[in-house]
Amino acid sequence: MKAEPVAVVTGASRGLGRYAALSFAEAGYLVALCGRTDDDLAEVERDIQDVGGWAIHRALDVRDFDAVRDWIGYVRENLGRVDV
């Protein structure tokens, strides 16, 4: 398990979600990104890595409860917890 806090950010590929994801990364959080467009999420993940942060991403629709539950389970399994 990683020692850094973990933030899950929905809508992370643009707008406020993107800003929140970058802000969490700059504050030392590990960031789990989700949104609808894989290419856009991959770009945000690269931007986070460019500033020395760490992120993972998955494209999903937050209206799909099972997809969100699976994503959170994956994050918890691999990072140990979700703080934000």
Image (cartoon, rainbow, N blue to C red):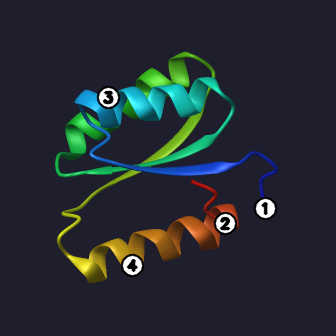
From the image, state whether disc 1 or disc 2 is nearer to you.
Answer: 2
The residue under label 2 is 81
What distance separates the C-alpha of mark 2 from that of mark 4? 14 Å
Q: Earlier in the sequence, mark 3 or mark 1?
A: 1
From the image, state whether disc 3 or disc 2 is nearer to you.
Answer: 2
Residue 60, x across and y down, in percent: 23, 61
What distance separates the C-alpha of mark 1 from that of mark 2? 9 Å
What distance separates the C-alpha of mark 4 from that of mark 1? 20 Å
Q: Which mark is residue 1?
A: 1
The residue under label 4 is 69
Q: Earlier in the sequence, mark 4 or mark 1?
A: 1
Residue 66, x across and y down, in percent: 29, 83
Give 40 or 4, whichever is nearer the viewer: 4
**Helix, strand or loop at disc 4?**
helix
Residue 21, x across and y down, in percent: 45, 35
Q: Are marks 1 and 2 in contact (CB under 8 Å)?
A: yes
Mark 3: which amino acid? Glu
The answer to which quarter of the image holds residue 70 is bottom left
What distance separates the C-alpha of mark 3 from that of mark 4? 24 Å
Residue at image point 56% right, 53% down: 84
Give 39 or 35, whichever is nearer the viewer: 35
> Taking 54 as reference, is 70 left or right?
left
What distance separates the C-alpha of mark 3 from that of mark 2? 24 Å
If the image is split into quadrants, where does the N terminus sit? bottom right
**Helix, strand or loop at disc 1?**
loop
Q: Are marks 3 and 4 in contact (CB under 8 Å)?
A: no
Residue at image point 52% right, 41% down: 55
> Taking 25 as reference, is 67 left or right?
left
Say if 64 sits above or below 32 in the image: below
The residue under label 3 is 43
Q: Earlier in the sequence, mark 3 or mark 4?
A: 3
From the image, state whether disc 4 or disc 1 is nearer to you.
Answer: 4
